[in-house]
Image (cartoon, rainbow, N blue to C red):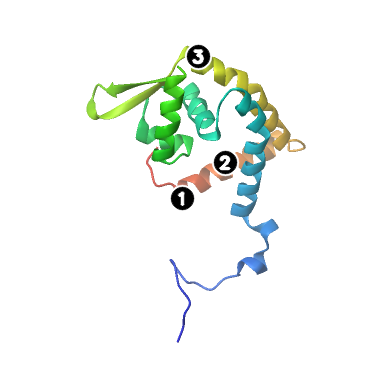
Amino acid sequence: MNDRVVIGDDTEGPRLGEIGLQQFAPYLMNRIMGRYNASLRDDLAKLGLTTPKMRTLAVLSVIDNLVISRLAVYAIVEQSTLSRALDALEADGLVRRAADPDDSRATRVSITDAGRAAFERLWPTMRRSYTRMFAGIDAEERANFVATLQKMLVNVRKHDF
């Protein structure tokens, strides 16, 4: 009897041990983002922010007035976690929520001037971490890498935006 659980397509191919962690892109992406987020933790704490709050402010600083469901996708935060983050951000005066004028079931979120100022205080740390991440990588290689990531995002995307 075969006790193996098969999830998805069970086509033959190399196993993770044969690929190796240092050649497995999802592992590398998680390690990189883990280090990136860790590099921001001290500055986030000084501003009273968490990673979900920072992601929310970052997204809203670029694309303001989003419905919560879209904000959750862009901020890469589960809606329940985002809801708690928005409660705290709103209590601190960093965002405001309002009913969507076109859909009474939806709520839109906007960044306030105080929220924009908080994000601007954090941005230099984010920029330094980003710059350090790409040290020794020339502009063409970085552009190719970002283009590859954009293609990968299309491949795994669940949403049309």
Residue 135 visible in the snapshot: yes
Exactly how many numbered labels are in the figure?
3
Image check: 60 left or right of 135? left
Q: How crowded is mark 1: few (under 14 residues within 10 Å), some or many (20 or more)?
A: few
Q: Which residue type does callout 2 highlight?
A: Ala
Amino acid on which disc 3 is placed:
Ala
Mark carried by residue 147: 2
| Residue 40 visible within the image | no
Helix or strand or loop: what does disc 1 sit on? helix
Among numbered discs 2 and 3, the one appearing first in the sequence: 3
* Spot occupied by residue 126 in the image (x, y as percentages of width and height): 64, 28
Q: Earlier in the sequence, mark 1 or mark 2?
A: 2
Rendered location of residue 9, percent (x, y): 45, 68
Q: Quadrant of the C terminus?
A: top left
Q: Which residue lies furthest to the bottom in this view?
A: 1
Q: Residue at 54% across / 29% down in the picture?
A: 54
Q: Distance between the residues labelled 2 and 3?
A: 34 Å
Q: Label 3's element?
A: helix
The answer to which of marks 3 and 1 sits earlier in the sequence is: 3
Q: Marks 3 and 1, how far apart in space?
A: 35 Å
Question: Of the residues tagged 1 and 2, which is closer to the observer?
Answer: 1
Q: Which three-letter amino acid code belongs to the residue tagged 1? A: Val
Q: Give the CA separation, mark 1 to mark 2.
A: 15 Å
Q: Mark 1 points at which residue?
A: 156
Q: Quadrant of residue 5?
A: bottom left
